[in-house]
């Protein structure tokens, strides 16, 4: 399969696919925890980096291949191959990042992602032009598509697994194997057939680029992917505001509220018995677990793992620090079932677990709370609830 290929460029192509996969999946992992329209930006960024990884890997692999010396690349098919790639990857990520990722949805996304990788490859191959024709072995074409779909499924399953940072590493490796495995399997079944003198396949006056120009473009995209990967490893600067100011240094910004240490053990429940025999009935005992819907049935999340509950029409979305899942309870029912010593409704559509609050910051007339976890996420706080949130967290403003 790698006969005649430059081994260093082959290794580089696989590394680029893995780095692009890691950057794209790390952005996609934040979609579920990001409220409002920001998740569209994250989805676009994730799709772009995955598409960059696929496209750049493909053309680094082409530079590693023993192509005829007069080969040039037609610009239009090359651009179309990237657009196909970006569109298909974006749709695939949308399917698994929005809503409950059922088995049917994951399989459909894997099939779509694998088909997109294969389409990008063969459209890009169609952009090769020179004194040759290209023939493909049908068995290798089918095998390359199967490799892309199967490994894409493995990458998506690893991405959806709840195993801390390991899931991103596993999914990015599987993604790199999917892209590079498909590419080099297809290349093994591709043959160049010399044409008669004076016949120039495909070119026909179309705009073309030499391998040197392609090398420059690929180098730039490789730099972008590497930069995105390194940026994805940089800690969130918002978390730095939680570090206490060193004596003599300037205090944090006035719009950042720093929580005092909170005991992890719940405070004793106050008796709800009515005074003088008159009042509301006693509050029922809090539920120890929350039900969430999965592809294979209803699961239950321990209350200690719940970070937030978000209203979603007549149901809710429960975030466990890793991702959101659908809960059959309404927001009002969830508020009634959860322990008020641990949970607080900070917005008409949001309930948060007080012990998991990592940061509170004012934004406009309201505020924003960040909850800890493998995938930290932010929850809005209504203006009317800011004082109560500060009281519950023991917050105080620090002055210089």
Image: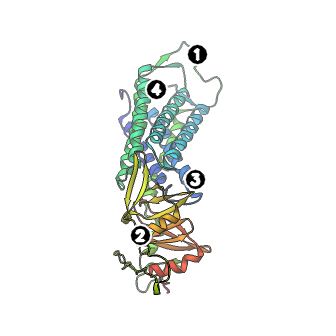
Of callouts 3 and 1, the N-terminal one: 3
User: Between 103 and 364, which is closer to the camera in this rendering?
Assistant: 103
- Label pair 4/1, CB-CB below 8 angstroms: no
Query: Cα distance, mark 3 to mark 1?
Result: 48 Å
Query: Badge 2 local density, few (<14 within 10 Å), some, or many (20+)?
Result: many
Residue marked by disc 4? 67
Q: Can you tell which mark lies on residue 40?
A: 3
Q: Secondary structure at mark 1?
A: loop
Q: Position of residue 125 (x, y in %)?
A: 51, 28
The residue positioned 52% from the left and 63% from the top of the image is: 331
The residue positioned 52% from the left and 26% from the top of the image is: 71
Residue marked by disc 2? 356
- Label pair 2/4, CB-CB below 8 angstroms: no
Q: Is residue 313 left or right of residue 241?
A: right
Q: Position of residue 47 (x, y in %)?
A: 52, 46
Q: Secondary structure at mark 3?
A: helix
Query: Cα distance, mark 2 to mark 1?
Result: 69 Å
Residue depth check, mark 3 versus mark 1: number of the one nearer the observer: 3
User: Between 171 and 99, which is closer to the camera in this rendering?
Assistant: 99
- Label pair 3/4, CB-CB below 8 angstroms: no
Residue depth check, mark 2 versus mark 1: number of the one nearer the observer: 2
Q: Position of residue 146 (x, y in %)?
A: 41, 30
Q: Secondary structure at mark 2?
A: helix
User: Between 213 and 118, which is closer to the camera in this rendering?
Assistant: 118
Residue marked by disc 1? 199
The image quadrant where one finds the N terminus is top left
The residue positioned 36% from the left and 80% from the top of the image is: 268
Above or below 137: residue 215:
below
Residue depth check, mark 3 versus mark 2: number of the one nearer the observer: 2
User: Between 276 and 30, which is closer to the camera in this rendering?
Assistant: 276
């Amino acid at each position: 399969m790698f006969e005649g290929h430059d081994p260093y460029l082959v290794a580089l192509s696989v590394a680029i696919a893995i780095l692009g996969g890691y950057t794209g999946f790390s952005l996609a992992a934040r979609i579920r925890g990001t409220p409002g329209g920001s998740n569209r930006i994250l989805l676009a960024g994730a799709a772009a980096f995955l598409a960059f990884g696929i496209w750049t890997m493909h053309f680094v692999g082409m530079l590693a291949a023993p192509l005829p010396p007069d080969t040039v690349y037609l610009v239009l098919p090359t651009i179309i191959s990237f657009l196909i790639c970006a569109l298909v990857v974006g749709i695939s990520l949308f399917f698994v990042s929005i809503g409950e990722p059922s088995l049917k949805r994951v399989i459909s996304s894997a099939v779509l992602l694998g088909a997109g990788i294969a389409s990008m490859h063969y459209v890009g191959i169609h952009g090769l032009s020179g004194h040759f024709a290209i023939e493909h072995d049908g068995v290798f074409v089918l095998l390359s598509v199967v490799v892309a779909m199967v490994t894409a499924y493995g990458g998506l399953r690893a991405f959806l697994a709840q195993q801390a940072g390991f899931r991103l590493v596993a999914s990015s490796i599987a993604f790199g194997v999917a892209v590079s495995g498909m590419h080099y399997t297809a290349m093994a079944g591709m043959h160049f057939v010399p044409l008669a003198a004076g016949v120039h396949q495909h070119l026909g006056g179309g705009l073309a680029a030499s391998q040197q120009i392609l090398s420059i473009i690929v180098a730039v995209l490789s730099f972008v992917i590497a930069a995105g990967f390194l940026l994805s490893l940089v800690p969130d600067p918002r978390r730095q505001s939680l570090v206490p100011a060193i004596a003599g240094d300037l205090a944090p910004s006035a719009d950042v509220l720093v929580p005092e240490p909170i005991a992890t053990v719940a405070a004793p429940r106050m008796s709800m018995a009515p005074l003088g025999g008159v009042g509301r009935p006693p509050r029922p005992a809090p539920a120890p677990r929350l039900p969430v819907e999965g592809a294979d049935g209803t699961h239950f999340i321990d209350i200690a793992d719940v970070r937030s509950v978000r209203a979603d029409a007549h149901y809710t979305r429960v975030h466990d620090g890793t991702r959101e899942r659908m809960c059959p309870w309404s927001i009002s029912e969830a508020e009634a079932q959860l322990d008020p010593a641990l949970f607080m409704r900070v917005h008409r559509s949001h309930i948060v677990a007080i012990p998991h609050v990592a940061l509170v910051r004012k934004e406009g007339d309201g505020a924003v709370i960040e909850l800890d976890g493998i995938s930290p996420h932010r929850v809005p706080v209504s203006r009317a609830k800011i004082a109560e949130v500060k009281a519950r967290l023991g917050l105080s403003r620090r002055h210089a």
